[in-house]
Image (spheres, grey):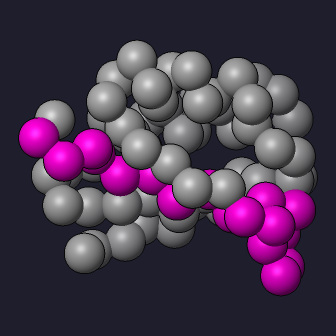
Amino acid sequence: MPETVLDVRGLPPPEPLERVLDALGALQPGDQLRLLIDIEPRPLYAMLDRNDLAHRTERGPVSGYEVTIWARAGA
């Protein structure tokens, strides 16, 4: 599965969200996006759910959080 890494650590709001939304617009079926971010992006989760995108959030070894995003099966 091809993966794109998007590092938005250290960016002021709302730039991280804007960059994530741009990257999601370029996401192709079978691709995944790994987001590196300082804080957990809780508002993003509802947006992902509404657009049939699955996600997994983990504490990052380097970043605060790593969020992996991909299209749900059948979406």
Answer with the quarter of the image where residue 57 lies.
bottom right
Q: Position of residue 53 (x, y in %)?
A: 37, 38
As drawn, 48 above or below 1: above
Foreground pick, 34 / 58? 58
Total count of labels: 0
Q: Position of residue 12 (x, y in %)?
A: 87, 35
Q: Which quadrant is the C terminus positioned in? A: top left
Residue drawn at x 26%, y 61% is: 31
Stretch in magenta:
58-74
As drawn, 39 above or below 7: above
Q: Is residue 9 left or right of residue 23?
A: right
Residue 43 is a magenta residue: no
Residue 5 visible in the displayed image: yes
Q: Position of residue 74 (x, y in %)?
A: 11, 41
Answer with the quarter of the image where residue 40 lies.
top right
Residue 15 visible in the displayed image: no
* Residue at the far bottom in the pictured view: 61
Residue drawn at x 51%, y 21% is: 47
Q: Position of residue 22 (x, y in %)?
A: 43, 35
Residue drawn at x 27%, y 44% is: 72
Answer with the quarter of the image where residue 63 lies.
bottom right
Q: Is residue 17 left or right of residue 24?
A: right
